Image: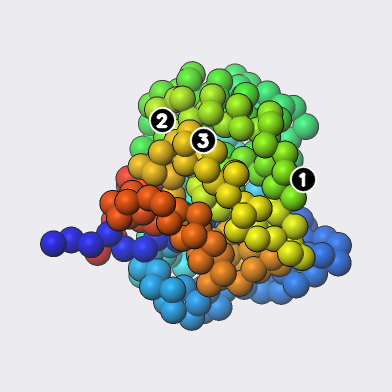
């Protein structure tokens, strides 16, 4: 009988000696202003029983994705990489093909862009972006959506426009958990979930909550909304390590996710903690 491994479908690494992470600013994020490597991730991940991970890009520079692929090639823990490329470039299809030919290129499973930082709330449905996303679909890759709640309508529109592309919503769309702001996020999330080619990561909740004193009950209205909208077979767990560490350590984040999904069946939890990631990202895990 095959057993689905526990998959952490969202984590990062960065080396400040290689390049700065300009988004790490201010005293609250000061604990993140150091290098985080796979060697740092391995002890808590292995202690938690994680069998595979998905490493996700952090900065929008072309050099980062080959670096992540090279790390994946040398470390069996990393089953997939979500990288970055300029979706608006006319040669995006060629760039994706070149990335697949690099060491570790077989572990490229998705592309992401920091849409949350784009001033245009309709950036995702620009014609040049749509052409790039069509190339991502043609390459058989998924596309991670890192967006803010006001960008959910554009995400829904683009998912409808490109039914052949698998869209993965990061961090449940970053709702205002600390403020208890369910609406209009919840209604817009349900609209996105109505598109069958969409998935959602149960990740990033603790950093949208009050870092100083969140509880599982603070997170539950938001996780329940996600579970009701997408269903377990389209939801995947992600730690968002090391960003999560400003609010909770690796084990506590996983414990919270397990508590939020305790009402699911064994098979449904198997989807959230492994099966959905394998399906959405087409991961090859022993």
Label 3 vs label 1: CA separation?
39 Å
Residue linked to disc 2: 197
Mark 3 / mark 1, whichever is N-terminal: 3
| Residue contact between numbered discs 2 and 1, judged by CB atoms under 8 Å | no
Mark 2 / mark 1, whichever is N-terminal: 1
Determine whether, in the image, residue 263 is placed left or right of residue 158.
Answer: left
At 73% from the left and 35% from the top, the residue drawn is 118
Residue linked to disc 3: 92
Q: Residues within 10 Å of mark 1 (few under 14, many from 20)?
A: few
Tag 1 secondary structure: loop
Q: Nearer the viewer, mark 3 or mark 1?
A: 1
Q: Where is residue 15 shown, x and y percent of the image?
A: 64, 70
Report the number of numbered marks: 3
Tag 2 secondary structure: loop
Mark 2 / mark 3, whichever is N-terminal: 3
Q: Quadrant of residue 130?
A: top right
Identify the image quadrant of the N terminus.
bottom left
Q: Where is residue 141 shown, x and y percent of the image?
A: 41, 40
Residue linked to disc 1: 179
Determine whether, in the image, residue 218 is placed left or right of residue 103.
Answer: right
Can residue 66 be seen in the rendering of this structure? no
Q: Nearer the viewer, mark 2 or mark 1?
A: 1
At 66% from the left and 44% from the top, the residue drawn is 174
Q: Where is residue 213 shown, x and y percent of the image?
A: 74, 64
At 54% from the left and 46% from the top, the residue drawn is 223
């Amino acid at each position: 009988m095959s057993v689905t491994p526990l998959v952490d479908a969202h984590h990062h690494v960065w080396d400040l000696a290689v390049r700065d992470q300009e988004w790490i600013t201010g005293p609250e994020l000061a604990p993140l202003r150091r290098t985080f490597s796979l060697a740092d991730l391995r002890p808590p991940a292995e202690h938690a029983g994680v069998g595979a991970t998905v490493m996700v890009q952090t900065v929008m520079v072309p050099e980062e994705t080959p670096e992540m692929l090279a790390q994946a090639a040398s470390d069996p823990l990393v089953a997939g990489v979500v990288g970055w490329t300029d979706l608006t470039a006319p040669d995006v299809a060629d760039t994706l093909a070149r990335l697949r030919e690099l060491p570790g290129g077989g572990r490229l499973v998705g592309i992401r862009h920091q849409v949350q930082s784009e001033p245009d709330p309709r950036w995702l449905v620009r014609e040049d972006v749509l052409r790039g996303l069509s190339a991502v679909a043609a390459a058989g890759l998924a596309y991670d959506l890192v967006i803010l709640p006001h960008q959910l309508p554009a995400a829904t529109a683009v998912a409808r426009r490109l039914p052949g592309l698998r869209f993965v919503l990061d961090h449940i769309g970053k709702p205002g958990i600390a403020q208890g702001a369910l609406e209009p996020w919840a209604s817009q999330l349900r609209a996105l979930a109505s598109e069958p080619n969409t998935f959602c990561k149960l990740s990033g909740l603790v950093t949208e909550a009050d870092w100083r004193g969140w509880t599982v009950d603070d997170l539950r209205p938001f996780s329940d909304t996600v579970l009701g909208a997408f269903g377990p077979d389209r939801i995947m767990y992600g730690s968002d390590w090391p960003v999560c560490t400003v609010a909770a350590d690796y084990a506590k984040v996983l414990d919270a996710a397990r508590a939020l999904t305790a009402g699911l069946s064994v098979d449904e939890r198997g989807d959230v903690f492994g099966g959905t990631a394998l399906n959405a990202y087409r991961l090859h895990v022993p």
